[in-house]
Amino acid sequence: MNIQKEQVLESNKKSLKSHEEHYDFLADKLAKDGHDVSGIVSKLAEFQVAIPSWALGAGGTRFGRFSFYGEPSSLEQKIEDIGVLHSLTQTAGAVSLHIPWDIPSDYNAIKEKADALGIKFDAVNSNTFQDQKDASESYKYGSLSNTSQAVREQAIQHNLDVIKIGDKLGSKALTVWLADGSCFPGQNNFQTAFQNTQNSLIDIYKGLPEDWKMLVEYKPYEPNFYSTVIQDWGASLMLANGCGDKAYTLVDLGHHLPNSNIEQIVSILQLKGKLGGFHFNDSKYGDDDLTVGSIKPYALFLIFNELVYGMENNPQNPDLAWMIDASHNVKDPLEDLIQSLEAIQEAYAKALLIDQKALKAAQLDNDVVKCQEILQGAYRTDVRPLLEKARLSTGGALSPINAYRALDVRNSLITERGKNTVATGL
């Protein structure tokens, strides 16, 4: 299914006058406060977030999975769904593939389809947390950290193959997430597991093209609950540093223990030039992979405050890879992703409103109250008219959710694909 520009323009007509009134009011107020409104809108319009190929179908738990019907059953259909998202939001201009779930059968055809929809190929993701059909070795007891050299070599080769696939598509980064760890005390030697992982990552790193990055993801628990080999940002940073200048830490917002100060982690990694990218989601208890901003929107805003500061003041840190990593158990996946894109843009816009000079002065004066007032003043601003303006300037919908429903996208997908399709990789 493709959404035409005329359909988006038609959906905007009913809300255009209201938008202009709200935008003019907010823009006038912000301009009087010294903000470069057009500059903020331009930054919002340029900001792109990758959609993971595995998030376009229904998620699930170990207890069950409930389909939303009309799911994409091929990589071509997944890219078409991202095209729908991008047409409406103008923010979903990239796709992140998980291999071997999404190996193209025709690379040129896939690239042409993506190009036609304005979609680029973001970081490619390897999979050594599942045994693959016809694989000679099992990852039951780990992959890159395994005590078996044969298992480690198989996992290393898989990552090298993923790099080759990504290179053909124009990707520039490899994301490595390991399920490796232990369920019981004494099961693993912690030092041996960590050193095996470091050596394996070094072998993978040697296969990176010159203009590529390696992103090392971390997670404190699940599926192994006694120990995880790459359990936190410190372990990830050590492994990245052990590989070289092209290796970085990747932060997944759901991969932290309760009350972790993620904004502090982000800030220090940027200072050291080692923050490589983000997986956006939200969580209540653990890696729930919930809609971005649905549980802790203020925390998301505080993270973006540090990101905006770092992007302005830490030139030693590379451009970041942005991606949503969510699981849609009770929502239409495309509606969930639209809500996530909106939440990310909203947090970014609010962070752009923070007077960093005034905040710095208040910090130097130890004026704690003033610091809080500056942050919360920006957070309490309704920035939705700015997001609408950014979408409007690039041909997107004023209200992507309303347009999605008015165009009856899900039922159109069901009519086109049927009710029995299942997205690969779930």
Image (tube, rainbow, N blue to C red):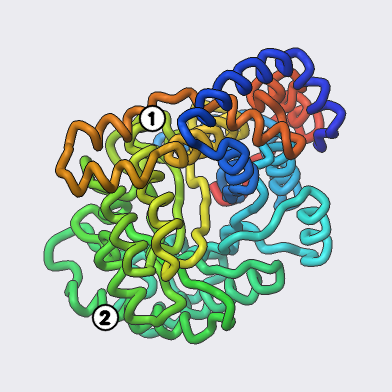
Where does the image place residue 296, in percent across and percent down from the top left?
34, 32
Residue at image position (56%, 65%) is 133
Q: Secondary structure at mark 1?
A: helix
Q: Give the residue number, with chain letter if any, for mark 1.
A: 379
Task: Kindly identify the amino acid type of the residue bearing the numbered disc 1.
Answer: Tyr
Residues 78 and 417: in front is 78
Residue at image position (71%, 15%) is 15
Vertical placement of residue 173 versus 43, above or below: below
Where does the image place residue 395, in percent across and percent down from the top left?
76, 36
Question: Distance between the Cα atoms at labels 2 and 1?
Answer: 44 Å
Mark 2 neighbour class, 10 Å CA radius: few under 14, some 14 to 19, many 20 or more: some
| Residue 156 left/right relative to 392 | left
Vertical placement of residue 417 versus 216, above or below: above
Q: How many marks?
A: 2
Residues 222 and 268: in front is 268
Report which quarter residue 229 is drawn in: bottom left
Location of the N terminus (image quadrant): top right
